[in-house]
Amino acid sequence: MKRITGCVLVCAGVLFSGSTLQSAAAQDSATLPYMNSRLSAEQRATDLVHRMTLEEKATQMQNNSAAVPRLNIPAYQWWSEALHGVINEGVTEYPEPIGLAATFDAPGIHTMAAQIGIEGRIKHVQNLREGHTGIMGGLDFWSPNLNIFRDPRWGRGQETYGEDPYLTSRMGVAYVTGLQGNDPKYYLAIATPKHYAVHSGPEPTRHFADVDVSKHDEVDTYEPAFRAAIVEGKAGSIMCAYNAINGEPACANQYLLQDQLRGKWGFQGYVVSDCDAVRDVAANHRYRASQAQGAAISVIRGMDNECVTFTSRFGDPVEKAYIDAVQQGYLPESTLDTALIRLFTARIRLGMFDPPDMVPYTKIDEKELDSAEHRQHARKLANESMVLLKNDGLLPLKPEIRKIAVVGPLADQTQPLIGNYAGQPTHIVSIMDGLKAEFPNAAITYVPGTQFLRTDGTPVPDSLLTTPDGKPGLKADYNEGMRGGPGSETKPVQILSRTEPNVKLTKENLPSQVAEKKTFGAQWSGFLTPNESGDFLLGIRCKGFCRLAVDDKQVTLTYGGGNEPVSQAGRVHLEKGRKVALEFTYGARNGNAQAELIWTRANNVPSPEAIAAARNADVVIAVAGITSQLEGEEMPVSEPGFLGGDRTSIDLPRPEEDLVEAVAATGKPLVVVLMNGSALAVNWINQHADAIVEAWYPGEEGGAAVAETLSGKNNPAGRLPVTFYTGVDQLPNFEDYGMANRTYRYFSGKPLYPFGYGLSYTKFSYSDLSIPTSAIAAGQPLSADVTVTNTGKAAGDEVVQLYLRFPQVKGAPRVALRGFQRIHLEAGASRQVHFDLKPRDLGMVTEDGDPIIAQGDYTISIGGGQPETTAPVATGHFHIDGQYALPE
């Protein structure tokens, strides 16, 4: 989907009318079958759809579903997101999913998702009451992302639960069941696992890529988490991806949608497309000749609701493709009806056609929004996500430390903490804020030390700007509604055009024509004529949607929401006296307006001030890494090592590496805190730093979690949900979706840090492994018990991991995770941990793609990490008699 970061976007269409049906109803509508709550949701939906005309039906086939007043159908906007918190304002934001995966805490994810569902319900009620329009206000949440993070170069891997199908399955089921609630009749909200399937980069080619993948890799790697979310979690919807798989677009893929999803998995919910993926069927995949034919084949194969980025497509309303498809004979109207029945069944199960008093989730106390309990759980998950990668005894920091030097560009920033696809919390704790609170008796000096990833630009001088017709300043055009961003109109209605000295918009200097509007858009255009040559960081500081293009090339883009402006810049080379064209596009909501054009000279040399601060300190804390402005969804990035949101190198960016090396040369004790959504090849740091903490993008409480981990208040127990390789030379071609030599299950080399790895401030041992001593029959479950003892001097959590090695059957992985539990043990305490392995947990996939339980000898390993690593483990063997075919 289109990239969403830290804000709420506004759509030009109507959002929803929800439970206000009765106020606008015709007198006789209440007696019709579709309003009879005693009938099943599907019966009601069927009655409703059969009363609609073809034209009315067509308007329901996109996320911007129109109202049908004569049938008392309110408009509804299906597009909402809740990857790790509702994308809205004033909500709780939990760690990015890659950090959630590092917790290995499925019950904690379930609790989080239930809290997200509650906050989503509250925001829905508030938006109804306030009459808001646009996306991000409905109850269908396009989460979780269950794609497998097969390659660390993919920029959206941060949104996933890592590289392992089993871990991803458990986290996915926990999320889905938490978000959807446990009421037998009504959904709390609807979860939408995405992007189904075989989707994990590269970003720049996703709209036309055709992925060749074997049946083995589909069944073994790419499908299990989706299968679990549907079969076990009972997800109410699913999102099909952009790419094609083996010659067929994902949103028109017979194998994925018909054979697997609706066939073998028995899925009864609705399928929504990724945004513009149905358009891509004809326009980019060339799978059909026209938009009508592309829409038709998508619906025939099982797609029910098309997400569209804009409200028109190639100059026509989106619904025209569906009307044409039926009238031209490409799409039977009965097949269109089937899709609509699924959609209205979902809306009815959300309670949108019933009196509010009948729906239990309409009674949620609005005080639960961003409540202390939710924030406390965000802190708990942030603490649990911390992974201790190295510790030579420096951590936890000793109480007698009095002088701390903090360096690195990210230590005082808050936006990087919440990653991408995030809403705007009421507060975010930066790492600097966390350190000051946790070490009140220490003198803490902060020097960023590098310009890289900083947002300290100054306004571009007015004197360097000229309008398109050569006058001083820039041409400013203001328009009705929000310009740019998903769901916006392609041709906004202009309400004001004038010349302004620069882009320096604030709430106080808004033109009177837009000052009272909740949403508006603006565009500044003209030329910049630099007075010196060199590399510059040219960018934006704004609240809202901002995009800057230089000579028609997008330099930077951000959706900056909330109370604080977001700054972002891209690297450009400028020549003295040679003018370049500028286009600054802006969209604001709720009168929260701010936009500014900024720049600074590019200079990535470590600052002398940072080195001096390190020399004068008892300990140095270097906060380094990358951000969602570098890795993410299909976006412009001008820094070396990054391309279109993906990465071409997995090394720490050179300016930060230089800074860390410079402060390490002072000889002072050094802790490196990494912030990132994907693996970093920190080889030099691993050899030279005294301690390394992986913090991911840890959410609104992330700074507190980092500080508590450094002090020892939080004993880290997070585990890596991805392999940390030593470099891209250990990886296959990025565009190769085959799993050979990928992820810990098939990688044959020696990584920097293995999947499942993580240290603690205490130590654990494993003993008394108990498994069946006699052979078990294929298809029967297996139980295992092990005793875990905290042999150290500190209380702490341990992530108990169960791995299997399989008989020598072609297609079997090298080793595979098949169980995990996160437990807490006081110093010296022991606990017996029990695992029940179901038949599917004992299974593997043959070379030909058949899931089976194979006959032969198995090795089971239960411990603090993978077998044959530094983790403590207990190992045993068992035998399975016979072979058993598992259902796909």
Image (cartoon, helix red, strand yellow):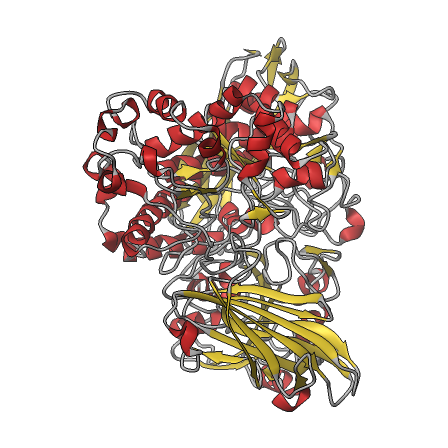
Residue nearer the viewer, 844 or 752? 844
Residue 343 coordinates in the image, percent (x, y): 43, 31
Q: Is residue 155 left or right of residue 737?
A: left
For residue 47, above or below residue 446 = above
Q: Residue pushed farthest left?
A: 357
Residue found 67% across the figure and 42% down from its top: 150
The image shows residue 705, relative to residue 332, as above or below, that is below
User: Which percent across, then down, holds residue 94?
Assistant: 43, 54
The foreground one among 311 and 285 is 311
Visible residue check, residue 367: yes
> Quarter-wise, where is residue 40 in the image?
top left
Q: Is residue 221 something that shows in the picture?
A: no
Kindly indicate the quadrant of the structure image that contains residue 674. Answer: bottom right
Specify whether 191 is left or right of 667. left
Q: Estimate the x, y position of residue 608 in percent, counting from the top left.
A: 66, 87
Q: Name the residue nearer the viewer: 802 or 740.
A: 740
Relative height, residue 423 to residue 551 (above, below): above
Placement of 823 over or under 774, stated as above or below: below
Count of all numbered marks drawn on residues in the image: 0
Residue drawn at x 25%, y 26% is: 37
Residue located at (69% from left, 35% from top): 290
In which quadrant of the rendered view does residue 847 lie? top right
The x and y percentages for residue 215 are 70, 24
**Image quadrant occupied by the C terminus:** top right
Q: Nearer the viewer, residue 513 or 427?
A: 513
